[in-house]
Image (cartoon, helix red, strand yellow):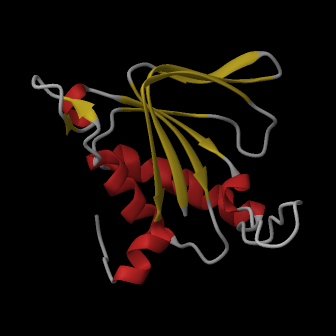
Amino acid sequence: MRAVIQRVTQASVAVDGKTVGRCGRGFMLLLGVADGDTEHEAEVLAAKTARLRIFEDENQKMNLSLSQVDGEVLCISQFTLCADVKKGNRPSFTPAAAPREAERLYLYFVQRLRAEGVSHVDTGVFGADMQVSLINDGPVTIILDTDTWKNSGFASA
């Protein structure tokens, strides 16, 4: 499971010209679910995301988490994060989870973020053609990949 997290002052997502999700100060998060991902990856990634300290404290050091700044999340599904571009120039998306399983784990991830104490989590529409707008704060962009923790034996965030 992969997440691209952008610290934002605001973000929104529209489908067919209609806003379907938004957030204020917090994270605009793109989530890719890979074939073989399970609830465990969603739980570890949600915990890491909720605790990620990338908001500035009174000393201008990135030291505060979402809950410490009453931050919000806009979570968008994005299978293209699982693209394989090892050969040629046309990406292969076979590493991505099948749509039904990807949607199930995407929704589970959102549920786990809420369970981790993130009070405002909005989403896009799974599988839809979406237009995402955001104001990146910093800019700060962090990439998280659960494969990092699988290979290190790290079982939890």
**Quadrant where the image shows the N terminus:** bottom right
**In front of the other: 3 or 122:** 3
The correct choice, above or below, for 148 with respect to 49 in the image is below
Q: Along the horizontal axis of the image, is 60 left or right of 52?
A: left
Q: Quadrant of residue 155?
A: bottom left
Residue visible at 25% across and 42% down? 53
The correct choice, above or below, for 76 with respect to 25 in the image is below
Residue most extreme to the left = 59
Tally the marks: 0
**Quadrant where the image shows the C terminus:** bottom left
Q: Quadrant of residue 79?
A: bottom right
Q: Quadrant of residue 45?
A: bottom left
**In front of the other: 104 or 148:** 148
Q: Along the horizontal axis of the image, is 52 left or right of 130?
A: left
The correct choice, above or below, for 113 with respect to 145 in the image is above
Residue visible at 83% across and 61% down? 91
**In front of the other: 120 or 134:** 134
Relative image position of residue 84 (x, y in whole percent):
75, 67
Residue visible at 33% across and 38% down? 118
Residue visible at 71% across and 44% down? 126
Q: Along the horizontal axis of the image, is 136 left or right of 66?
A: right
Relative image position of residue 120 (x, y in whole percent):
39, 30
Relative image position of residue 86 (x, y in whole percent):
76, 72
Relative image position of residue 67 (x, y in whole percent):
24, 35
